[in-house]
Amino acid sequence: MIDTLPYLLEYPYGCTEQTLNRFLPAVLTQRTLQKMGVNLADVKKQRTNLDAQQTYRGKYPAHWGEQPGDQTRDRVELPAGFGQGSSTLAKWIQQHIDEDAKLMKGRSKDFNPIFDDVEMNRIIADGVKALTEMQLTDGGWGWFSGYGEHSTPHLTAQVVHGLTVAQQNDVPILPDVIQHGVEWLKGYQTNELTKLREGDKHRENPKYDGRADYRMQADNMDAFVAMVLSEHDANDPAMTDYLYRDRGDLSVYGMSLTGLVLHMQQDAERRDMVIKNVEQFLEQDEENQTAWLRLPEASWWYWYGSDNEAMAVYLKLLVAVRPNDEIASRLVKYLLNNRKHGTYWNSTRDTAMVVESMADYIKATGEDQPDMTVEILIDGEVQKTVKINGENIFSFDNVLLLQGDAVTSGNHKIEVRRTGKGPVYFSAYLTNFTKEDQITAAGLEVKVARKFYRLERDDKQVSVQGDRGQVVSQQVAKYKRIPLEDLRSVTSGDLIEVEMVIDSKNDYEYLLLEDHKPSGFEPDDQRSGYVWEGLRAYRELRDDRVSFFLQDLARGQHSINYRLRAETPGKMSALPATIEGMYSPELVGNSDEFKLRVNDRE
């Protein structure tokens, strides 16, 4: 849980979900440690990275381990107005963090502020303030804020749930912020219930001629909204009935959410039936003591098709109903073993969801008091022996590193032996380096091809109607596109158009398309925001890239373009354009690398 935080805190984009998950997992982790009785001030001086797969050892910069009197900033007591609202907290934080703390923010992806009260307060205040400002006038949230944005049930439910969890963990939230979000969700649910009731009339009488916008069954979004509303005792029982009736048409994720709804409504009989329905997808491996849900592959790119999120919600359901069930511990082990990036899972969203479920699991099972001796053997020889207990859980030496001549060719056997009580989580990591001059295109389910064009002015005279109805000749700015091949030359000052052609084999949602522009080229347009250049996208202009956030991408071929101005002479290389699922990073494709020369204008 701790080692996920640098990734979440330093994630570079600012959509609603990532703004929430930049601080909420840190709050949950810090509160979990505090409830364990861990002295965070002592642990801050030196701690162990509990995931040995990451090369970072969890050490802070030297001056972060100094005594308080020698640090470059002072520790200040919280103000009397703390807890009255995000603006009060943010104002106080801004006054009491000096330039050193500001410089430390974002200096390293391994920076972890969880043991620093001042820094944690700043992160929390920034996150709450940003989410409050991103709330739309109707009470909901969209993917981003600003002109052209609209509230969506998925993002509104995420934020209301997240702020509710934060508030339960003593984070000050303005009451109206959550309440307005709940009211938006209640309005959404009311509308969907009207459609479902209209669908019932069609079930009873196929010839019924009523409203055109009826629905025949409840869906996964209904389950998510119902779960969040149930946390506020605001869910309509009629929606619970529809969800239970239509549970066979829900995803595994949706069924687990429905189970949580039934549990909060103290409907044990129907809850247990839903758990049995979910466990039809449960698989276990007796050899390594893991359990997981094997989800159908039909909709894995949608939010309700995320296997990690589905297992996290299922874990929350198990922890709420039977926390000491063997399946729960096996599910935790499977999730820990399958972090695709060492310390986090696929995305900010599923990582935050897993952290939340882990916090519930630790609280319910008491898995915070280990007492054991662990031996690591390689080819039958003991290479390391470590004693682990509650006092040294964050300071024991947990890394065995082999490098250079110690890594020999052939097969090797690694053994981990435990004496005592407590779980042992371990991983093995192998890395190597290779050189590749020209990066070539790759991708399967989604692909991107990039083309460069030099634009030449080719103004046209067109006939338009004048203010008196007469025909008037008017000059219109036009450009002729001259295709550029790899290794071709352009002149500084030339206007270049970049076209990215996306080939999608399925309907997808929430994708990130990024063009890594060549050095010495600057975007002709200077403003970020929503654009309609072939596809509707939220565009961010960054120093080294141009990012396009695509909320929806239909099956087929699409193109999106933007313009650059060549400025600095020299030989330049544009790294491949990439496209990936924001919440399914295994959905990925990239274009060819492109090289060109910029000549100085004479």
Image: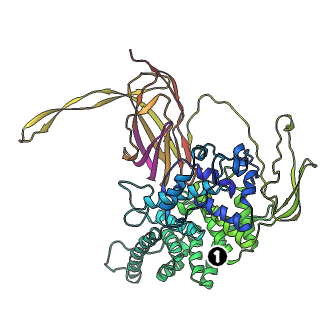
Q: Position of residue 242 (x, y in %)?
A: 49, 79
Residue type at numbered disc 1: Ile
Left or right position of 493 against 319: left
In terms of depth relative to the viewer, which is nearer, 230 or 407? 230
In terms of depth relative to the viewer, which is nearer, 115 or 388? 115
Q: Quadrant of the N terminus?
A: bottom right
Q: Is residue 506 visible?
A: no
Identify the residue position indicated by label 1 in the image.
Answer: 275
Q: Which residues are magenta?
A: 535-561
Q: Residue at x 77, y 67 (%)?
A: 367
Left or right position of 408 against 467: right
Q: Position of residue 205 (x, y in %)?
A: 37, 83
Location of residue 435 by image quarter: top right
Left or right position of 548 against 46: left
Q: Residue at x 62, y 62 (%)?
A: 27
Q: Residue at x 82, y 38 (%)?
A: 403
Q: Secondary structure at mark 1?
A: helix
Residue 36 is one of the magenta-drawn residues = no
Q: Position of residue 263 (x, y in %)?
A: 60, 80
The secondary structure that dominates the magenta segment is strand
Residue occupying the far right of the picture: 381
Q: Position of residue 42 (x, y in %)?
A: 75, 56
